[in-house]
């Protein structure tokens, strides 16, 4: 079996499972946010559940429209707060303690290798970077799972992505996944497990692995997953709140498709509007002017991402025609950025340095685009109207390209500014 199939088998009490099989599996953790939890709460009440299956396995994180941007957002966040109090949930993260959900849970050791995790958010697949099966589900599935501790699945076929060769300078996990999506398309892995492997992946630090798995959904994937190893152990050790288990694919596992990539040939990559698969080398986009830069989100809001951006923009200024918004993904990352002087670098460069929130990524708040405006962002989606007006445009990049672009006022690479 593949790693994905092994995790499923372990969680549904079977010796083996096969692609296409319908199963009912026990979940280790259930996640919802201030947009999706209110629907789940409403449905949970409708089914007449007497209580939750485990008050310490349900996570509610208000991060999309929080700190609350308007009355409607405040009411939605209040639903999470009230439900959490009513059922004595141990994992409700209020503003001031919360962070962008998919950065917060690994950081807090709440998701661990070998887990089966569902979340009412499509980027739940992030946790595959730890060697867990994690996928986004609908709010009604969350409601049912909150009552029963189980969820149904169709076991996905697996695709194997093998990466080899030395990465070029400044090229990282974001470039690898953008390049991959550009190659196979936004439906190239539809309802498949995307297993990332090879010597390049084995050398990737955890933050880059989480970034890659985060965007499996942008290729249509059911989940993204990386076999846990010593790097995983170093990350999980000391922070894991539960025991964990490393799974790996058997040598004779069956894959529906295998793709190989020579990473020495992968350049700094940018996704152009209006699909993540519309990729081009950053160096070919120097004529594209921008109005806004966003560095953050569950894709690239970790401390390592902020360090890269700060290294490039230190001692320089954001172009006078550009707004630059930097959003650490969690309170811990925010504090670390302050301690390391990164916050000061961004503020001195005349960028905004914000409290943790999903904010502009989903067109929520704190960085909405007007008609005709153009942004480059380290976020994960660039669909029509994703960050604001339907006639605005979003380009996706890694933090190095985003920071260089903030200085130049157009899409640029770090070689032009460092």
Image: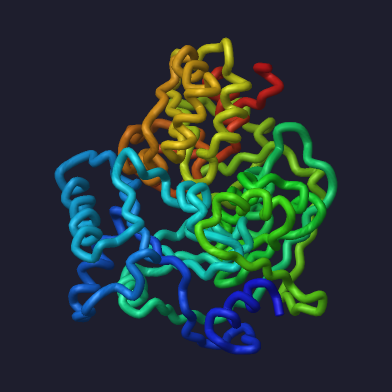
- Looking at the picture, the colour scheme in use is rainbow
Residue 117 seen: yes
In the image, 96 versus 264, the foreground residue is 96
Residue 395's spot in the image, x, y percent? Answer: 52, 38
How many labels, in total?
A: 0
Q: Visible in this render: residue 385?
A: no
| Relative image position of residue 228 (x, y in whole percent) | 69, 60
Image point (45%, 65%), residue name? 136
Q: Residue at x 58, y 43 (%)?
A: 271
Name above or below for residue 329 compared with residue 231. above
Q: Is residue 185 left or right of residue 70?
A: right
Which of the 4 image quarters holds residue 405?
A: top right
Residue 25's place in the image compared with 315, above or below, is below
| Residue 70 on image: x %, y % | 18, 41
Quadrant of image for the C terminus: top right
Q: Is residue 396 above or below residue 105?
A: above
Query: Residue 198: which quarter of the image?
Result: bottom right
Q: Nearer the viewer, residue 403 or 3?
A: 3
């Amino acid at each position: 079996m593949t790693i994905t199939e092994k995790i499923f088998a372990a969680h549904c009490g079977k010796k083996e499972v096969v692609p296409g099989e319908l199963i009912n599996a026990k979940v280790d953790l259930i996640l919802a946010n201030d947009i999706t939890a209110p629907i789940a709460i409403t449905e949970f009440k409708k089914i007449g559940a007497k209580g939750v299956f485990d008050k310490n396995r349900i996570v509610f994180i208000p991060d999309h429209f929080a700190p609350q941007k308007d009355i409607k957002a405040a009411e939605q966040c209040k639903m999470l707060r009230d439900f959490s109090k009513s059922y004595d949930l141990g994992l409700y993260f209020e503003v001031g303690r919360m962070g962008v959900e998919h950065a917060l849970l690994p950081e807090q050791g709440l998701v661990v290798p070998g887990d089966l995790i569902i979340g009412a958010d499509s980027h739940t697949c992030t946790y595959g970077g730890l060697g867990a099966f994690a996928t986004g589900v609908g709010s009604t599935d969350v409601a049912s799972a909150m009552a029963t501790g189980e969820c149904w699945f169709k076991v996905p076929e697996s695709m194997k992505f093998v990466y080899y060769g030395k990465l070029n300078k400044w090229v990282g996990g974001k470039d690898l996944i953008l390049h991959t999506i550009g190659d196979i398309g936004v439906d190239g892995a539809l309802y498949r497990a995307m297993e990332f492997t090879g010597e390049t992946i084995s050398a990737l630090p955890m933050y880059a692995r989480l970034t890659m798995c985060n965007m499996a959904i942008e290729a249509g994937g059911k989940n993204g997953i990386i076999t846990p190893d010593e790097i995983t152990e170093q990350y999980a050790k000391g922070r894991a709140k539960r025991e964990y288990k490393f799974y790996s694919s058997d040598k004779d596992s069956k894959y529906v498709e295998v793709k190989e990539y020579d990473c020495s040939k992968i350049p700094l990559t940018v996704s152009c509007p209006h699909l993540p698969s519309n990729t081009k080398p950053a160096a070919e986009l120097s004529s594209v002017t921008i109005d806004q830069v966003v560095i953050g989100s569950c894709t690239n809001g970790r401390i390592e991402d902020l360090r890269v951006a700060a290294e490039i923009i230190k001692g320089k200024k954001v172009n006078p025609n550009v707004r630059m918004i930097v959003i650490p993904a969690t309170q811990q990352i925010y504090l670390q950025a302050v301690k390391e002087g990164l916050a000061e670098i961004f503020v001195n460069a005349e960028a905004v340095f914000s409290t943790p929130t999903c904010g502009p990524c989903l067109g929520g708040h704190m960085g909405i685009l007007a008609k005709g405006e153009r942004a480059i962002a380290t976020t994960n989606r660039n669909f029509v109207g994703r960050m604001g007006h339907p006639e605005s445009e979003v380009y996706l990049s890694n933090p190095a390209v985003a920071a260089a672009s903030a200085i130049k006022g157009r899409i640029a690479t770090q070689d032009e500014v460092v």
